[in-house]
Image (cartoon, rainbow, N blue to C red):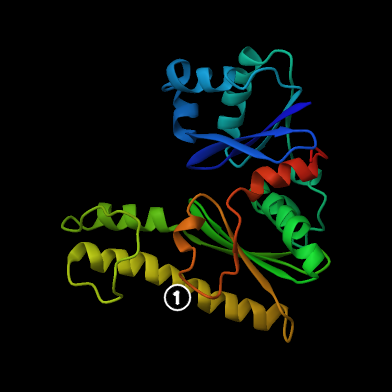
Amino acid sequence: MMFLAIDIGNSSTKFGLFKQNEPFEMTFGFPTASILSGESFRTELLPKLQALGKLDSIIIASVVPKASEALKEILEGSHEEASIRLLKNSDVPIVNNYDDPDQVGIDRLLSSLAAYHLLGKDAKKPIILIGFGTATTIDCINADGQYLGGIIALGIEASAKNLHQIAAQLPEIELSFPKNILGRTTTQSIQSGIMNGAVAMIEGLVEKLHAENFPEKEILVVATGGLAKLFENKTPFIHQIAPHLVLEGIAIATNIS
């Protein structure tokens, strides 16, 4: 049995292949903007999809509705044999304590579900989950696996691009940590502001969320998302990196794995 899980995010769409009773296999990513525009569809996306071979089902989680429809149309042509399902928030088997449960991005619910089942459940610890994507999100899951709510901030990539766009003399920079916190060039200064500023924000918010929601309890702090690896070993506040929790959450929510 072959299943394709698809995570459509604002910037990137990730494709993960699951074979029943086998480990998850990350296949590839593709820009969401290119799916919306149809750019490079025949030359790049279609060959990658066809190379996956025969699929039994395709399950999509999306925060970009127009991209969901465009990709569904592509998949119906590339994999006529597969059933295609678009997940809703109500399909995610997690207690959702948001005031309006439909307002939470399905990516946040799925990554919370996966973080609990793969990391928090056996450890019997609450989780603070940091998602490094187009936005930086910080979500809380209690030791029973309930989603409590979270925080949304501007993502580090968007911060760097916006700074470059609104300040004519500031260059566009590579997202990496400079050697020192104190920058001695404009590039180093921006890198330090973006990257070390993100670390300071994360550490401060994790500390406050811990005190507010899980006082006197040991917690597990997990980082996920496309930019999570940048923060590996950069702060003792992050205990584990798990980049593909949304895809793994799709598998858990739909009983693939």
Query: In the picture provided, is 149 more to the left or to the right than 225?
Result: right
Secondary structure beneath dot 1 equals helix
Residue 29 place in picture, x, y as percent: 51, 35
Q: Amino acid at mark 1?
A: Ala
* Residue displayed at 81% across by 64% down: 122
30 displayed left or right of 178: right
- The residue sitting at 19% across, 65% down in the picture is 186
**Residue at horizontal 56 percent and vertical 60 percent from the top:** 137
Q: Is residue 19 above or below residue 168?
A: above
Q: Residue at x 73, y 87 (%)?
A: 216
Q: Quadrant of the N terminus?
A: top right
Front-most of 69 and 243? 243
Give above or below for 2 relative to 241: above
Looking at the image, can residue 83 be seen?
yes
On the image, the x and y values in percent for residue 215 come to 72, 84
What percent of the width, then of the height, locates residue 57?
75, 25
Q: In which quadrant of the rendered view does residue 87 lie?
A: top right
Counting the numbered discs, the total is 1
In the image, residue 167 lies at what x, y percent? 22, 58
Quarter-of-image position of residue 27: top right
> Where is 23 relative to 178, above or below?
above
Q: Which residue in the protein does label 1 denote?
A: 200
Most foreground residue, 48 or 135: 48
Task: Locate the C terminus by quadrant.
Answer: top right
**Residue 123 shown left or right of residue 192 in the figure:** right
Q: Is residue 100 visible?
A: no
Of residues 207 and 65, which is closer to you in this image? 207
Q: Answer few, some or many: residues within 10 Å of disc 1's Cα (few below 14, many 20 plus, some between 14 and 19).
A: few
The residue positioned farthest toward the front in the image shown: 22
